[in-house]
Image: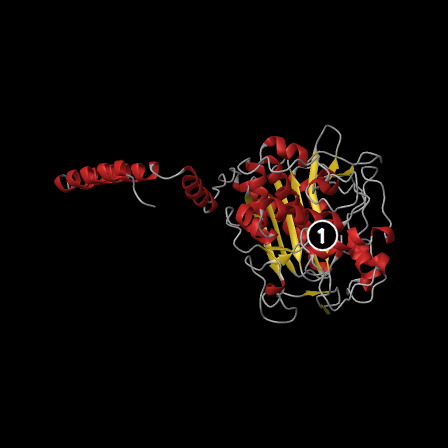
Amino acid sequence: MIPTSRTMFYYLNLQSFLWQNIVLKRIIPFTFLLITFTFSSCSSSQKKEIVTKARDTTMIPLPEPKTISPFEKTELANTCERWYDSILERGGFNGAMLVAKGGNIVFEKFKGSGHVGSNDTITNTTPFHIASVSKTITAMAVLKLWQDGKINIDDEYSKYFPSFNYPGVTIRNLLSHRTGLPNYLYFMEDLGWNKSVYVKNQDVYDWLVNYKAKLNVGAPGKHFTYCNTNYALLALLVEKTSSMPFPQFIQKEFFGPLSMTHSFIFTHEDSAKVNPSYDFRGRMIPLNFLDLVYGDKNVYTTAEDLLLWDRALRSNLIFTPETLIQAYAPYSNEKPGIRNYGLGWRMNLYPGGKKMIYHNGWWHGYNASFIRLIDEDATIIIMGNRYTRAVYKAKTLAPALGARYVSGEEEESENVKPGDSTGVAVPKKIVHRRRR
């Protein structure tokens, strides 16, 4: 940038003055003036670039945790310890558990090793694949774009992808699993995908478009059908509207600013650094051709990082209250009962308006549960890499944190036989359930 004559005039005069006033308390403010004058000579586009770069590196300071009494903390810790011993410990758990109240960690425990049977002990910095809990982050990425005015979630997806030949499917439909689209976990294989080649998000899109006549497609907006395809498409939407790869966007908007230093979106380059997953017998489960699709899965994170994500959602520092109202609204009301789905979030709806906002996940031997008790400002996080259905009993700990829980409610799990958790040669009907 070449300074204008006006800038040089100020600069020369300022330089003369500074030599005569070589005192620190005077140098600082006048140096600031010099920067101000130089900045004023920049073009508007240059100013925008400088501001953008500054914003990109800005950390988001989360509010301090709320005060809780030592007595309450001790009582909660003891209750969580008893729950852990009776549920997770007996279930062959290998992973991390964290419980927080008011942003304070009241219980945190780690069990096992990254490679089952080895000595790489799991710690608070060990990242785990959180499977479909990843959808909560994808959904909020889309809602961030909506909040920033870059998309309209009630637009049809085809507005952004003109070749998408499924009329009536809106972004809101994708977020709430009300599209009627088939699940790529089925149709890629059914249509003859070469399983020696990894499927990518664009492949899912291309096969949806090119093989529509061979697919079983429902009407959009009619009913809730949980479908991973929806979130693979949403990741593509984030990439197109942000002009950056999905992993980079999530790092820039969420993981970086929130100091989630052990969190990332899995790509093939990460294969050597992540811990493998295991079935309930402790047998390692290899990667397969579906492992590189992201948006519906493929977030690796730690329990402490996920707590940062929870606190950010509660702080209104990234999302406005209006955005969160959209995220936590129930969209599937055609069936009675307390269970429902918002925009990327499962929920239980209780009399009096209280909600339990949560999501579970399962991919290969990884499983996770992320439970957020909004009114009680409490959080339960469990993640591991050796499959156990005990993880999905996390909701039974909610009453200890002040939340209502309906006794006898069916736990939210994938409802598969233990012998089918290897991820190898599993009947397709069971594969669909186990990869939710």
Q: x%, y% of residue 17?
A: 16, 38
Residue 74 in which image quadrant:
top right
Secondary element at tag 1: strand
Is 83 in front, or is 291? 291
Q: Residue furthest left?
A: 20
Q: Is residue 199 left or right of residue 119?
A: right
Residue highlighted by disc 1: 361
Residue drawn at (17%, 40%) of the image: 18
Tell me if residue 19 can be seen.
yes
Is 322 in front, or is 314? 322
Q: Residue furthest bottom?
A: 118
Q: x%, y% of residue 63?
A: 49, 38
Is 204 in front, or is 407? 204
Q: Dot 1: within a 10 Å radius of its alpha carbon, few (fewer than 14), some, or many (20 or more) residues?
A: many
Q: Residue furthest top?
A: 352
Name the image colouring: secondary structure
The amino acid at mark 1 is Gly
Q: x%, y% of residue 9?
A: 22, 37
Residue drawn at (34%, 36%) of the image: 40
Residue drawn at (64%, 42%) of the image: 142
Residue 318 in which image quadrant:
top right
How many numbered dots are placed on residues in this image? Answer: 1
Q: Is residue 355 left or right of residue 59?
A: right
Say if 214 sits above or below 17 in the image.
below
Tell me if residue 101 can be seen.
no
